[in-house]
Image (cartoon, rainbow, N blue to C red):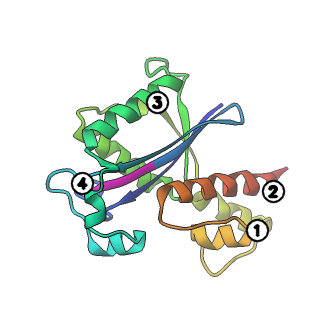
């Protein structure tokens, strides 16, 4: 089984117009983590970067000029090279299950990232199946396996499971999310 744990930090909520600023993840194959990645991305021309989004991430506009932030097309090529290392995009049975917290948000940004780089084939690498605690925790709550807490935010569930989290850095978020998925799915055994 191939799992792509992934998280993004963005310049806003609009996947078509907002910048993709950070793309991080863990590639897990047959229950072993085989690679971790953490890309910082310069906003594309005309991209929205809301101050509120930067404030949540504890970033400034000057931070986006740092040399660790690479042009989007360079990051895209590195990301595709990474995916190609583990998945045969032409084999319909060789795809990543994509995992993350509220993963639909990240998938929308990935789709637009691909499109801006003239590639409409994100699903050559991932399948439609997702692992998302944001979606399955309510089921575990209804079954009595988890309590109802004040909210279903990643930070709240990490605190409940005693998972360390320095939120709003996509690498930290996805490391914590992976641990949350591993711990919460044990409840079904």
Residue ID at (64%, 57%): 136
Which is in the foreground here, disc 4 or disc 2? 4
Q: Earlier in the sequence, mark 3 or mark 1?
A: 3
User: Tag 3's secondary structure?
Assistant: helix
- Cβ atoms under marks 2 and 1 closer than 8 Å: yes
Q: CA distance from mark 3 to mark 1?
A: 35 Å
Which is in the foreground here, disc 3 or disc 1? 3
Q: Position of residue 33 (x, y in %)?
A: 65, 38
Which is in the foreground here, disc 3 or disc 4? 4
Q: CA distance from mark 4 to mark 2?
A: 41 Å
Residue topped by disc 2:
187
Question: In the displayed structure, does residue 153 sit left or right of residue 46?
Answer: right
Q: CA distance from mark 3 to mark 2?
A: 31 Å
Image quadrant holding the N terminus, namely top right
Q: CA distance from mark 2 to mark 1?
A: 9 Å
Residue topped by disc 1:
146
Residue topped by disc 4:
43
Q: Earlier in the sequence, mark 3 or mark 4?
A: 4
Tag 2: Cα neighbours inside 10 Å, few (<14), some, or many (≥20)? few
Prevailing secondary structure of the magenta residues: strand
User: Tag 2's secondary structure?
Assistant: helix
Q: Is residue 1 above or below residue 63?
A: above
| Closer-to-camera residue (187/164) | 164
Residue ID at (42%, 33%): 123
Which is in the foreground here, disc 3 or disc 2? 3
| Closer-to-camera residue (21/108) | 21
Q: Earlier in the sequence, mark 4 or mark 2?
A: 4
Q: Is residue 24 above or below residue 88?
A: below
Q: CA distance from mark 3 to mark 4?
A: 22 Å
Q: Which mark is residue 173?
A: none
Residue topped by disc 3:
83
């Amino acid at each position: 089984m191939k799992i792509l744990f992934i998280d993004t930090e963005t310049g806003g909520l609009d996947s078509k117009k907002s910048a993709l600023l950070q793309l991080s993840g863990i590639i897990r194959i047959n229950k072993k983590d085989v690679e971790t990645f953490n890309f910082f991305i310069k906003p594309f021309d005309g991209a929205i970067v809301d101050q509120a989004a930067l404030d949540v991430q504890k970033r400034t506009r000057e931070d986006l000029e740092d040399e660790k932030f690479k042009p989007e097309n360079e990051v895209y090529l590195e990301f595709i090279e990474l995916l190609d290392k583990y998945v045969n995009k032409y084999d319909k049975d060789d795809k990543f299950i994509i995992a993350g917290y509220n993963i639909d948000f990240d998938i929308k940004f990935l789709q637009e990232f691909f499109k801006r780089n003239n590639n409409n084939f994100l699903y050559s690498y991932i399948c439609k199946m997702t692992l998302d605690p944001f979606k399955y925790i309510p089921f575990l709550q209804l079954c009595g396996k988890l309590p109802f807490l004040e909210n279903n935010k990643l930070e709240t569930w990490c605190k409940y499971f005693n998972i360390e989290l320095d939120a709003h850095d996509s690498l930290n978020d996805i490391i914590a999310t992976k641990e949350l998925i591993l711990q919460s799915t044990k409840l079904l055994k």
